[in-house]
């Protein structure tokens, strides 16, 4: 602290820090300043100093708050530790497996199914509608929590269903109480805001219920074995659509497609160039693939694919976005289901990304916390598959040509042509499939603004489908298909409800309006079991795909941006255009995106003002309503932490690698000029180079030329490279000019390996709800720290520019 104060004072006196006593005396008494410091410059300096001290104080407050959060969570941690010790003494695994083995055959009996459903419905009605006193509701809360803590330790699907059902029971009791006991308002303003909050809550109840149905029984489909000899296998056309992407982004996908393990006479690869670029045509001719373009860009990507469909005739069509690199066994893994099921029209695989998205890069959670899309591709699509409702996602998919042409090709009525195409196929009675194995990988969105733009398109497109071709109406779909499609479309209407939740406490904190007419005690007794059980159930069912509280962060970042497009799509469903998501860009310098963060900044200021007003009410104005004030303050504090995480996402981290490095562990051999062969391990790779872990004794100098070998299965492939970085135990290599066959081999040894992405989730942290909430809190505080640093840098840059301008005039 002393050093920082001296540094600031030295800046004011124009003494080079730390300086000696003689320099300080000269500056104070004898030596006049060379340039006159104006009052404006002094004011800027004072502001910089204030921001410096504010940032220092905020960091210390954050550390104190983290300690308080840890202390507050101690009782729950102690209870969970006690349950863990109990679990170690008893064989809950065997008990859970016995329950599943006993129930599974009985559930196949249709009479038993209806009997069980009737019994559950009667019991649920009694439990949901029976009024409890405050003490009774407290014991009900404790009983539910204890039951959930036991159920979450039991393996198998039936305990998971029981845990989810228990969560639905607590939700149902809260809904019944909310509708029957909290809607007595004293003024029109309270009624308007109260019913608005109820509508937002009703939306979340519906999404929770539909989501439970959608993911109740993930199918977990395995690949089907190919039948017949290779000469009887179907012909496959591989489509790689591109528009404005750089050729360096497209090349790895083309090279991987050339290496697909499929009979050469039954595989045709097409580069679909809507940019009509001569260099792409030349590249296609050079590597031996087909090149297709068209005179216009009508219907964007959907039109591009439809144009190619009329120029080709393969029995199956594989579609890969131009940055999605397929693994070598993609076709052999997927085609079997088309042979087994004649009605199978489409098979989808996950969209996997080997580069961090803006959340992962800017918050530092890459490969540690599941990304935003993991829930959809990790659980929801598996659940959809059980109900024969798998969505086509535009890439990493295989489609049978005949059914696709029967519905008129790729849908063009909306900007989410992929999901709409799947809906049309399902309406015709065709089936779909989903294999939850990452068989291709690509680049994530490169900036928050690009990410938001992509999600806006998705939200608009799903709202367009809901308006033009609503799955709840029309022919051809089963009830469960209708529910799955409706859930996906309704999900994108989260914008307004999320904004309601972020601002609802302000009604009381600013104006003392009671928009939930209930005591704080009763509200807590009904809300806490609902939130707690939902959190435990989600952590148990979705933990591998979505960590606790991260949905709040994702929705908060996007809420203000998807609210208007979804509303407009319901009014004017045919408006809007397809926007291509930029890939492969660079972030030369870290910066704070003030434009994209404008909604978060406004909400932060409003919540901060409400929190300050709440403190005033807590200690001065509303001392007779301590519980109510405290609950609204807690709600506001949570909103501020979530908004802080959103501000952290808006602080764009530096990204200077033109080709993304992929972390890995692969065997490699380094061949030196002296003939020595060094067995080592490849730590990371890209299309431009490798990182190697070598024995400590290896002596290689930067600038040396070497050869390095990697393996594609049993085949060894050697590549010439130059050493750019040499440290004890590690080397950084840059490939020298590679021939076309060498590039194909490099891709087959790295990106296109059959097991390239299978173990990607092993680095993810386990989802522990309390730790997850603590991490979100720390990320929220970190987001505000980044905001303070950005403001400080903004003022500092402005001051330096002002001084430079004055110096130039002088």
Image (tube, rainbow, N blue to C red):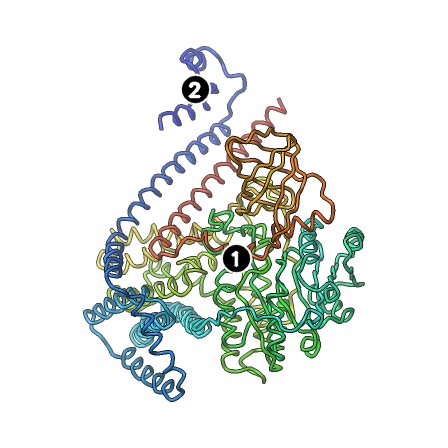
- Report which residue position mark 1 lands on: 758
- Which badge, 1 or 2, is on the more N-terminal residue? 2
Residue 756 vs residue 346, the one in the foreground: 756
What residue is disc 2 on? Answer: 18
- Gap between marks 1 and 2, in whole Å? 55 Å
Mark number displayed over residue 427: none
If the image is split into quadrants, where does the N terminus sit? top left
Q: Looking at the figure, which quarter contains the C terminus? A: top right
Residue at (58, 54) in percent of width and height: 444
Is 613 placed above or below 344 here? above
Q: Is residue 572 visible?
A: no
Which SS class for mark 2?
loop
* Front residue of 13 and 95: 95
| Residue lying furthest left | 135
732 left or right, relative to 611: right
Q: Is residue 132 above or below residue 611?
A: below
Instruction: From the image, state whether disc 1 or disc 2 is nearer to you.
Output: 1
Q: Secondary structure at mark 1?
A: loop
State the residue at coordinates (35%, 60%): 511
């Amino acid at each position: 602290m002393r050093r920082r104060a001296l540094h600031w004072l030295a800046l004011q006196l124009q003494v080079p820090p730390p300086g000696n006593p003689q320099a300080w005396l000269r500056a104070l008494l004898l030596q006049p300043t060379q340039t006159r410091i104006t009052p404006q410059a002094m004011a800027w300096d004072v502001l910089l100093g204030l921001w410096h001290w504010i940032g220092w104080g905020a960091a210390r407050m954050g550390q104190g708050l983290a300690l308080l959060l840890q202390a507050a969570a101690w009782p729950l941690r102690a209870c969970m530790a006690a349950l863990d010790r109990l679990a170690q003494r008893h064989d809950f695994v065997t008990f859970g497996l016995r329950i599943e083995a006993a129930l599974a055959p009985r559930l196949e009996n249709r009479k038993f199914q209806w009997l069980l459903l009737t019994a559950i419905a009667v019991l649920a009605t009694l439990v949901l509608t029976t009024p409890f006193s405050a003490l009774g509701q407290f014991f009900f809360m404790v009983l539910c929590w204890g039951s959930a803590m036991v159920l979450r330790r039991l393996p198998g699907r039936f305990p998971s269903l029981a845990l989810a059902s228990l969560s639905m029971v607590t939700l149902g009791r809260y809904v019944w109480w909310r509708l029957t006991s909290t809607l007595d308002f004293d003024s029109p303003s309270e009624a308007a805001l109260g019913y608005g909050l109820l509508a937002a809550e009703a939306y979340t109840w519906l999404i929770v219920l539909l989501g439970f149905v959608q993911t109740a029984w993930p199918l977990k489909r395995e690949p089907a074995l190919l039948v017949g000899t290779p000469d009887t296998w179907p012909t496959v056309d591989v489509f790689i659509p591109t528009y404005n992407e750089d050729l360096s982004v497209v090349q790895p996908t083309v090279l991987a497609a050339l290496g697909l393990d499929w009979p050469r006479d039954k595989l045709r690869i097409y580069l679909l160039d809507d940019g009509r670029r001569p260099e792409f045509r030349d590249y296609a001719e050079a590597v031996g693939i087909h090149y297709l373009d068209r005179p216009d860009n009508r219907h964007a990507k959907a039109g591009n694919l439809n144009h190619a469909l009329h120029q080709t005739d393969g029995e199956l069509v594989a579609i890969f976005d131009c940055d999605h690199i397929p693994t070598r066994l993609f076709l052999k893994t997927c085609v079997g289901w088309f042979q087994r099921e004649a009605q199978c029209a489409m098979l989808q695989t996950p969209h996997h990304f080997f580069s961090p998205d803006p959340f992962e890069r800017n918050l530092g959670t890459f490969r540690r916390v599941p990304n935003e899309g993991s829930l959809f591709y990790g659980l929801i699509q598996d659940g959809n598959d059980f109900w024969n409702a798998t969505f086509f996602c535009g890439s990493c998919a295989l489609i049978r040509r005949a059914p696709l042409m029967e519905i008129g090709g790729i849908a063009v009525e909306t900007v989410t042509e992929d999901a709409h195409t799947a809906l049309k196929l399902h309406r015709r009675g065709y089936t779909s499939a989903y294999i939850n194995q990452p068989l291709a990988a690509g680049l994530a969105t490169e900036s928050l603004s690009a990410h938001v733009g992509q999600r806006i398109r998705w939200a608009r497109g799903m709202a367009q489908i809901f308006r033009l071709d609503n799955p709840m109406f029309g022919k051809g779909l089963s009830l469960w298909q209708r529910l799955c499609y409706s859930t996906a479309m309704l999900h994108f209407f989260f914008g307004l409800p999320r904004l309601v939740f972020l601002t609802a406490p302000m009604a009381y904190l600013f104006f003392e309006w009671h928009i939930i007419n209930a005591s704080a005690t009763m509200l807590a007794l009904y809300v806490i079991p609902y939130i707690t059980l939902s959190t435990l159930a989600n952590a148990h069912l979705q933990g591998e795909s979505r960590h606790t509280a991260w949905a709040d962060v994702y929705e908060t970042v996007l809420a203000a941006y998807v609210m208007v497009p979804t509303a407009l799509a319901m009014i004017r469903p045919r408006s809007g255009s397809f926007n291509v998501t930029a890939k492969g860009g660079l972030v030369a310098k870290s910066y704070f995106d003030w434009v994209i963060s404008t909604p978060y900044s406004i909400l932060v200021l409003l919540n901060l003002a409400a929190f300050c007003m709440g403190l005033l009410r807590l200690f001065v104005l509303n001392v007779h309503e301590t519980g109510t004030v405290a609950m609204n303050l807690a709600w506001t504090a949570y909103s501020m932490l979530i908004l802080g995480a959103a501000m952290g996402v808006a602080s764009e981290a530096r990204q200077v690698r033109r080709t993304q490095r992929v972390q890995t562990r692969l065997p490699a051999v380094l061949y030196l000029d002296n003939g020595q062969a060094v067995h080592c391990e490849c730590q990371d790779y890209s299309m431009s180079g490798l990182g190697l872990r070598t024995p400590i004794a290896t002596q290689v100098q930067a600038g040396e030329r070497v050869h390095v070998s990697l393996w594609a299965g049993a085949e060894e492939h050697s590549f010439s490279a130059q050493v750019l970085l040499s440290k004890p135990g590690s080397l950084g290599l840059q490939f020298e000019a590679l021939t076309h066959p060498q590039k194909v081999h490099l891709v087959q040894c790295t990106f296109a390996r059959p097991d390239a992405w299978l173990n990607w989730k092993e680095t993810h942290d386990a989802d522990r709800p309390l730790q997850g909430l603590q991490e979100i809190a720390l990320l929220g505080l970190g987001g505000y720290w980044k905001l303070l640093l950005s403001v400080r840098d903004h003022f500092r840059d402005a001051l330096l520019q002002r001084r430079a301008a004055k110096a130039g005039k002088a």
